[in-house]
Image (spheres, coloured by chain):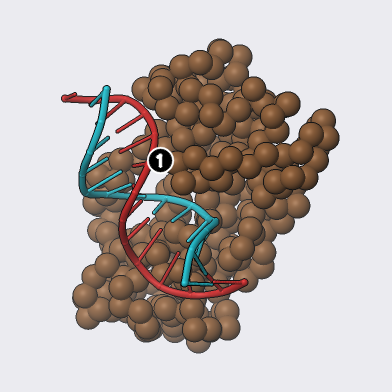
Chain colours: A brown, B cyan, C red
Amino acid sequence: MPELPEVETIKRQLARRIKGKTIRDAEVRLVKLIRHPVKKFKKLVEGAKVVGVNRRGKLILIELSKGVVLVIHLKLSGQLVFNGKGSKHTHLIYHFADKSKLLHNDLRKFGFVKVVEKDKLNDFFEKEKMGLEPLKSDFTFKRFRQLLSKRKKSKIKLALMDQSLFVGIGNIYANEILFASGVHPQRTVGSLMEKEIKKIYRNIKSVLTFAIKKKGASDRDYVDAGGQKGSYMKFAKVYNREGKPCLKCGTKIKRVKFSGRSSYFCEKCQN
DNA sequence: TATATTGTTACACC
DNA sequence: TGGTGTAACAATAT
């Protein structure tokens, strides 16, 4: 569930809380969470200091003093909670030298932690085929249109969620961006008019930025680094609102499933 | 118990 | 070939 706004929220809060701290002990409770032999992982991590916390797409990057970076993907239900209370879903605990700690919880256990050498981070992103950051200045309208044109036959919603074009947009925000743009999620990219592409471009930026202000969306499991829920769902116009009145025209919001994902939209406002 | 949830990937199909 | 869509997968709660 954590998409760009949720991961960005965690990143900002973590940076504030753990920068400068030394990891005394990494308590690995679920071996499959870390994609390394446990011994090697502990050796790399223990004794290292947190130099910085960053984000790339939906990945959290915790940079350590030993020239390595913890690359964390929370997938469906991952949480990183500073000084949180452990539960049966707590699979990894970083104990800092000052007795504070960072919990990595994951109810579905789909997430992962990889240790990547700092020098090799860019190779890693390239290998993972990660697209443009939608809130960075190099994400221009021209680049957006150009990237979209590589997927003329695909449905616009799937193109928005395609991490090899641009990163960070998942199901919640794809639905919201398309509602804000008045575009039906099943329209093909090739059928979009210049005006519509421009609207989508603007709304990617505005919806994501607004969602960061609201500290993300807590549809189910998501909490931020302080264990708090995000408030974006209060402002969602279509996501998870099947059967409820469209906030613009009152028509009932529809839910249609394609590509295994629920799409929410207003038939009247989006075409 | 069947189903829903998501990002990612393997694979079938034109 | 490469673009596209679908199914499968991870694990759990309800």
> Can I make out residue A20 in this image?
no
Which residue is more in the foreground, A200 or A43? A200
Under circle 1, the secondary element is loop
> Can I make out residue A260 in this image?
yes
Q: Residue at x 45, y 69 (%)?
A: A108
Q: Quadrant of residue A6?
A: bottom right
Q: Is residue A225 left or right of residue A260?
A: right
Looking at the image, is A229 positioned above or below residue A169? Answer: below
Q: Residue at x 47, y 29 (%)?
A: A155
Q: How many marks?
A: 1
Which residue is more in the foreground, A211 or A40? A211
**Residue sticking out furthest to the right:** A250
Q: Residue at x 70, y 46 (%)?
A: A242
Q: Residues within 10 Å of mark 1 (few under 14, many from 20)?
A: many
x and y, in percent, of residue A128 in the image: 29, 46
x and y, in percent, of residue A226 in the image: 62, 70
**Residue sticking out furthest to the bottom:** A99
Q: Which residue is mark 1?
A: A163
Q: Is residue A227 left or right of residue A139?
A: right
x and y, in percent, of residue A156 in the image: 50, 28
Q: Residue at x 70, y 33 (%)?
A: A266
Q: Quadrant of residue A224?
A: bottom right
x and y, in percent, of residue A145 in the image: 46, 20
Looking at the image, is A87 positioned above or below residue C11? Answer: below
Q: Is residue A176 left or right of residue A162?
A: right
Instruction: Name the kind of residue labelled 1 in the image.
Output: Gln
Image mark 1: chain: A
Q: Quadrant of the C terminus of chain A?
A: top right
